[in-house]
Amino acid sequence: MATGSGAIPNHTVVATRQRGERIAVQEFHLVLVNTERAGTAFPVKQETRIGKAADNDVVLDHPTVSRTHLIIQRQGDRFLVQDQASTNGTYIDGAQVREAFLKPGALLEVGDVQLRFQPTVSPVEIAPTADERLGELVGKSLPMRQIFALMQRIAPTDSTVLLIGETGTGKGAAAKTVHRLSPRSQGPFVVFDCAAVSDSLIESELFGHERGAFTGAVSQRVGCLERANGGTLFIDEIDDLSLDLQPKLLRAIEDREFRRLGASSQPISFNARIVAASKKDLWAEAQAGRFREDLYFRLSVFTVNLPPLRDRKEDIPLLVDAFAGQPLWERLPPQMREQFSNHTWPGNVRELRNAIERAKHMADIPELNNENLLREFTVAPGPQGEVLPVDFSGPFKSCKDDLIRAFEKEYLTRLLSRCKGNIARAAREAGLDRKHLYSLLHKYGLVQASEE
């Protein structure tokens, strides 16, 4: 893979963080299944010709295969199979086709020869950019500058993008950056947060509905897919999308059309780029059966893993100045700079931004040296995060109960902060029943702060 400027190569680029910063390339191959050469893989190029003749890209010397049996053409992030009037036909997953799109994992039958269409992943090197800012993203660390280089190359394409990262790592800012660097920058940027909408309303919010489609549908509603036409649709927290709705979203992305709920008319076409974000590893979720593998492959044409702030602490001074809108880092008291540098930042960049909101107007106030003002940034000596108040001098049960109460309150406070006070989303993220979560919030006097 070239690292300079130029067109995107014909494969998917995936930014990963396994054993340090690494970028891998996902290429599509056709793998022989049922011949004596089973396991042989053929790369799929921009145009791949398959047949018996020696001048084909994939030569299958079999009596049921025609001289030029079929052609596979890459169209953006889709692969179109075109049968070339073959004698014995072309089949995808058992269905004969003249022209059809090939999906990852599909079984392609060329006469009696079977090939599996599948992606493979291998590490590559990408040269980092010298820039320390790209759109709303800021950083001078190697992983961020590698991501900047990658995003500069994928933004001009029209392919789907999957952003992976912990809560608060800047997935929303990355999505806006992709949009603003793309040819669609003058179109709408529509955000749909799967975690912020109840399951019963997600389909209506996404696809829209007609009047009378369900109880309470008193007027027609235009959904996010339709509103994003000509621009970008950012689907946040897609790991929270129910398995029941995932096939409908996949079909809409595949076909570039959808129907509003309750509609009996022709489907509505849409032309929007899809950028999705997840706080979980969607491939692991797919392997565990909690996310559809076919939707994962459809979304992960380009995948960018955003590193947590604890893994790029050299970016903190830049981020502080960027959030403050002025040079602030050097004006902060040494004690605060040290604590900012040592803090594990479980809320990542979002937590830092909130801290700067409080600190930027107080940088010149002597009282900042008071440890009480910085208590939420006090860190533990080990890698596990912050110190909770522990008393080892009293009875075992009493000390244990005090520690549990401190943990529960701290956990719930951070949970509500991450979820911006949304109880439904907080319950899903914590894996708690909503009623149980409410009882815990009442217990620690946090309900009023969480309600909107």
Image (tube, rainbow, N blue to C red):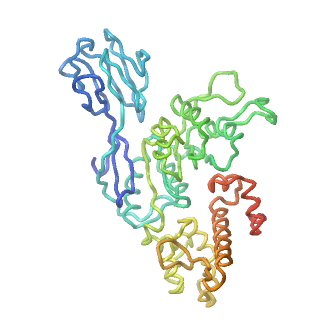
Q: Is residue 250 left or right of residue 441?
A: left
Compared with 203, 451 (above or below) is below
Residue drawn where x is 36% and y is 59% of the image: 21
Q: Is residue 215 above or below residue 265?
A: below
Residue drawn at the location 63% of the way across and 76% of the way down: 358
Which of 64 and 217 lies nearest the eye of the viewer?
A: 64
Q: Residue at x 42, y 35 (%)?
A: 77
139 lies above or below 222:
below
Question: Residue 127 lies in what quarter of the image?
Answer: bottom left
Q: Report the front residue among 442 and 77.
A: 442
Left or right: where does residue 370 sit relative to residue 80? Answer: right
| Residue 234 in sight in this render | no
Query: Where is residue 234 shown, x and y percent of the image?
Result: 56, 46
Residue furthest top as drawn: 87
* Residue 372 point in image, percent of width and height: 64, 85
Answer left or right for 327 relative to 420.
left
**Count of residue discs:** 0
Q: Quadrant of the C terminus?
A: bottom right
Q: Which x, y percent locates residue 12?
A: 37, 42
Judged left or right of residue 201, residue 24 is left
Q: Is residue 349 visible?
A: yes
